[in-house]
Image (cartoon, helix red, strand yellow):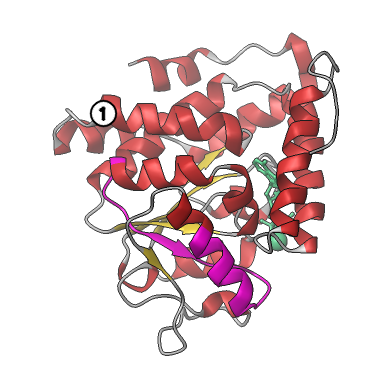
Amino acid sequence: MSDVPSSHPRYLSLKLRDAIVTGVEKGITSAHGLIAHGRGEAFDYLVGEETQAFAEAAIRSAAAMLLRASHPVISVNGNAAALVPAELVSLGAACDAPLEVNIFHASKERETAIEKELRDNGAPRVLLPLAGATLDHIDSNRRYVNPEGIAAADVVFVPLEDGDRCEALRKAGVEVVTIDLNPLSRTARLASVTIVDNVVRAMPLLIDAVGTLKVCDEEELNGIVSSYDNEAILDEALLRIRHGGGYHPSPDIRGCFRR
Ligand code: ATP
Ligand code: MG
């Protein structure tokens, strides 16, 4: 770890950089993951480096979607495993969803390193992609999935996802829940629910929301999901970026998560 004092104004951001660099050193994160993280940092500045109302609304809908799923799966890449391994394991336990390793740049070593990291953080079972099972509509390494995991899923949670794979999952009729700080990315646009927030801030809130909504019956969960409008949420995120500190959430967005 670098020796940045906790009084440094960018301390939290620098700590996250340390976590990503450690991920690369442990063989969990690819060098390309560093670039993806930098893009996320830039958008985090623009959304104010705190969880906004549009993210809270999306978190509530994401929790409802995960709870009403018959076969939810949590897809884990190298950046997510470096930043929030324990939270991914907790979310899996909270909504009874297996974790599946799925990385963009092919590497058996990295898949195994991510699997180990998740197990070290308490994951009872980690699925890996298998050569026999593939997603249609995609050419990259990410088309390989696990037959008991993503191949059979009705809802996939994929933080920091690549747009191509998000599109392939949607074309396959799967609901996609993502966390992505860039409201303009293809993933953000194509997902069913997009949480525009830093994965380190959003994960604990999502785990809490799953715990809170666990008591809801199917009808209540359906109501939460059907009243959610992802396009409106992304428009709100763009308003925050445009107006900075002068941004005020629109009243119906507030209603969306306060109900
Ligand atoms: P797309 O393929 O969806 O158009 P992209 O090619 O710009 O997006 P990728 O590298 O495929 O981006 O995916 C990484 C995404 O994750 C980026 O949109 C980036 O802003 C976002 N991101 C990176 N770090 C974080 C983080 N810590 N929290 C939330 N989002 C993040
Ligand atoms: Mg991409």
- The residue at 47%/88% (across/down) is 131
* Image position of 170 (left or right of 51): left
Q: Which residues are magenta?
A: 94-116
Of residues 218 and 145, which is closer to you in this image? Answer: 145
* Image position of 200 (left or right of 216): right
Q: Secondary structure at mark 1?
A: helix
- Is 62 rendered above or below residue 174? above
Residue 125 percent across, percent down from the top left: 34, 61
- The residue at 62%/67% (across/down) is 164
Q: Which residue is mark 1?
A: 213
Of residues 190 and 135, which is closer to you in this image? Answer: 135
Q: Residues within 10 Å of mark 1 (few under 14, many from 20)?
A: some
- The residue at 36%/73% (across/down) is 151
Is residue 157 at least partly visible in the picture? no
Residue 139 percent across, percent down from the top left: 61, 83
Is residue 91 at least partly visible in the picture? yes
- Residue lying farthest bottom? 132
Residue 163 percent across, percent down from the top left: 63, 61
- Is 132 rendered above or below residue 234? below
Magenta stretch contains residue 193? no
Magenta stretch contains residue 96? yes
- Is 131 rendered above or below residue 202? below
- The residue at 15%/38% (across/down) is 218
Quadrant of the snapshot with the C terminus: top left
Image quadrant where residue 77 sits: bottom right
Residue 183 percent across, percent down from the top left: 67, 41
Q: Quadrant of ligand 2?
A: bottom right
Q: Which amino acid does the dot numbered 1 rest on? A: Leu
Quadrant of the snapshot with the N terminus: top right
* Image position of 83 (left or right of 94): right
Image quadrant where residue 242 sits: top right
